[in-house]
Amino acid sequence: MKTEKRKPDARAGVTLIEMLVVVTIIALFAAIVGPRLLHRGDQARVVAAKQQISDIQLALSQYKLDTGTFPTQEQGLGALRVQPSGLDQWHGPYLLKDLGNDPWGHAYVYKYPGDHGDEPDVMSYGADGQPGGDGLNADVVSWK
């Protein structure tokens, strides 16, 4: 049996021009779509912070129904997971999981008595972690 030797086919590869065209198309696609996707991620963090604050407010309302008052400033939001000493009416935990940080990695701010009505103020200071700001740095608050 004879084995046939084949010559390498000159057309069996990708030319440099073809490769550059493909890379250019990918770069254009990334330049157009990339910023839009990044902006959606920022919007998702704001929505997540609003939802988490809403969950905290619900837990605070349940806490008040059981104990007759909201957690003190000193007890903070930790009172929703761990029973404060000397509080027999506590029937928690009021949150299923430990309260983590806001979507930007900062702790939620709790203030009782609040400045905006009878309920406590719960807020996230946004992306910059500082009070005030606008855009992504705007505060996400419980009273709006």
Image (cartoon, rainbow, N blue to C red):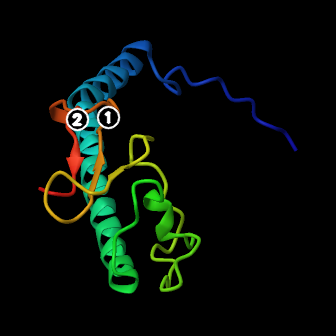
Q: Residue at x 56, y 73 (%)?
A: 83
Q: From the image, tell me which residue sits under label 2.
A: 136
Q: Position of residue 81 (x, y in %)?
A: 53, 70
Q: Tell me if residue 15 comes above or below residue 77 in the rendering.
A: above
Q: Tell me if residue 46 comes above or below residue 18 in the rendering.
A: below
The earlier-in-sequence mark between 1 and 2 is 1
Q: Residue at x 27, y 41 (%)?
A: 42
Query: In the rendered view, does 72 fall on the left or right side of 133?
Result: right
Task: Give the quadrant of the C terminus.
Answer: bottom left
For mark 2, does the 10 Å Cα neighbourhood hold few (<14), some (14 to 19), or many (20 or more) residues? some
Asked if the residue under mark 2 is in contact with the one under mark 1, i.e. CB atoms within 8 Å, the reply is: yes
Helix, strand, or loop for circle 1?
Answer: loop
Marker disc for residue 38? none
Q: Residue at x 81, y 38 (%)?
A: 3
Marker disc for residue 127? 1
For mark 1, does the 10 Å Cα neighbourhood hold few (<14), some (14 to 19), or many (20 or more) residues? many
What kind of residue is marked 1?
Answer: Ala
Q: Quadrant of residue 82?
A: bottom right
